[in-house]
Image: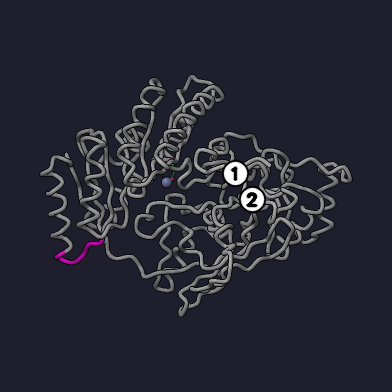
Amino acid sequence: MSDPSPSDPSTPAQRLAQLRAAVPTLQLRTDAEDLAWYGVDWTRRWTPAPLAVALPGDVDEVQAVMRWAHANRVAVVPSGGRTGLSGGAVAANGELVLSLQRMNKVLAFDPVDRLLTVQPGIVLEAVHAAAREHGLAYPVDFAARGSCSIGGNIATNAGGIRVLRYGNTREWIAGLKLVTGTGELLDLGRGLVKNSSGYDLRHLAIASEGTLGVIVEATLKLTDPPPDTQVMLLALPSFEVLMQVFTTLRERLQLEAFEFFTDRALHHVVAHGAQPPFDAVHPYYVIAEFASGSEAQEVQVLSAFEYCTEQGWVEDGVISQGGAQAAQLWRLREGITESIAACVPYKNDVSVRISAMPAFLAETQALLAREYPHFEVVWFGHIGDGNLHINVLKPADMDNAAFVADCERVTTLLASTLQTHGGSISAEHGIGLVKKKYLASTRSPAEIAAMRGIKTVFDPAGILNPGKLFDA
Ligand code: 2HG
Ligand code: ZN
């Protein structure tokens, strides 16, 4: 928490009493168990120590909390499903956690505009279900769908496994209501398809990681339901052929997703209970989902598969016959994060242009082989979007602080490799606390200065998620 201002020497207990008086209807939790639960995200690197957890039930309460926090200079951490991987929702310094979990309803559906208006605490999977009920789809999707919230997805511009076809969360936000650091309510975008009336503040709020405002409502674009699909899992002999397989499948099929993982990733998922797909072990695997159903499409699928095999790019493969098998194949990719969680991974989430991927990869592979000779490194990710997840696993006998320090040393080198290739240190997980010191490798000093200036406009007292993204 930011230090109390000189005119406000109150203790935490006095502050809470003040907050209770200012917003008498507000649900507040202060049990040690709640503070521990709401004070962290999936990073688990920080010790939670919030002041309290506020669970507002409506927009008025959020505004009242923010007005109080602004007046009393109390730091606030907006909080969704806390499935983030960059520490964006961590409250380790006496901040007030503002959990949107009770604000989790569908508010409206408009069939003409094909817009679904929801509260921020709704879980992604429930958004999918609501869209389906109306015969439509909300296409952003990823493994944390059962617990992440739409507000958190928007605050990080979440990507996931269908970006290749549908883009990031940003593409699907037609409107946003945002409560700023002074408690002002902004109604941004309002579902308009066309609106050339100056700065689009909605897009500043998207990916702002709770530093500009609290998202209290979102209007989401829906689209046609996805086509019937099949899933293909391919075993590849080398990384070099990966981009060739991608280019071939993208040319010949209507790709819905294209992801990769290594033998180490598969090893962990199988050890975690998944079914091994092939008898032999192969260095690399690709999972692709594509439109299929007509006879013509099926012929194309087989011919694309045969072509890749003839080129020597594919050592083995399987094509799903039915939804259950497709789900089983997807589990091999989507189960990776959970399967390595116990190994306390240090996560890199990097991106470059797809065209820069081969050169970037060659350099990065050499860098990591040189710098991490004794650590297990698990590679996977959204290769079709130029986005790699590189998870470095902590040796069981190594001290966590020493492990993180070593990984941070190597991440500095990785950040400069990324800079050479015009890439980003955070493709889709956000900067939060974890990537803060590398922001300057991805954004110029002038850009960071502009971001700071914007932060001051939305949050003049600097109370919204302080210390995340950049320091004050
Ligand atoms: C995924 O693509 C998520 O599965 C998590 O972004 C990535 O655990 C990770 O590094
Ligand atoms: Zn990902």
Q: Let me know if residue 118 appears in the view.
A: no
Residue nearest the viewer, comparing 242 with 338: 242
Residue 218: x percent and y percent? Answer: 56, 65
Q: CA distance from mark 1 to mark 2?
A: 8 Å
Residue 291 x, y percent position in the rendering: 25, 61
Q: Label 2, secondary structure: give it.
A: loop
Type of residue at label 2?
Thr
The residue drawn where x is 51% and y is 68% is: 174
Tell me if residue 311 is in the magenta stretch. no
Q: Quadrant of residue 437?
A: top right
Are discs 1 and 2 less than 8 Å apart at CB? Answer: yes
Placement of the C terminus among the 4 image quadrants: top right
Mark 2 Cα shell of 10 Å, populated few (<14), some (14-19), many (≥20): many
- Looking at the rendered structure, the kind of residue marked 1 is Leu
Closest to the observer, 315 or 130: 315
Left or right: where does residue 8 sit relative to residue 235? right
| Residues drawn in magenta | 291-296
Q: Residue furthest front?
A: 446
Q: Which residue is mark 1?
A: 469
Q: Nearer the viewer, residue 267 or 286?
A: 286
Secondary structure category for the residue under label 1: loop
Query: What crowding class fits label 1: few (fewer than 14 Cα within 10 Å), some (14-19), or many (20 or more)?
Result: many
Residue labelled with disc 2: 211
Q: Looking at the image, is 64 positioned above or below residue 327?
A: below
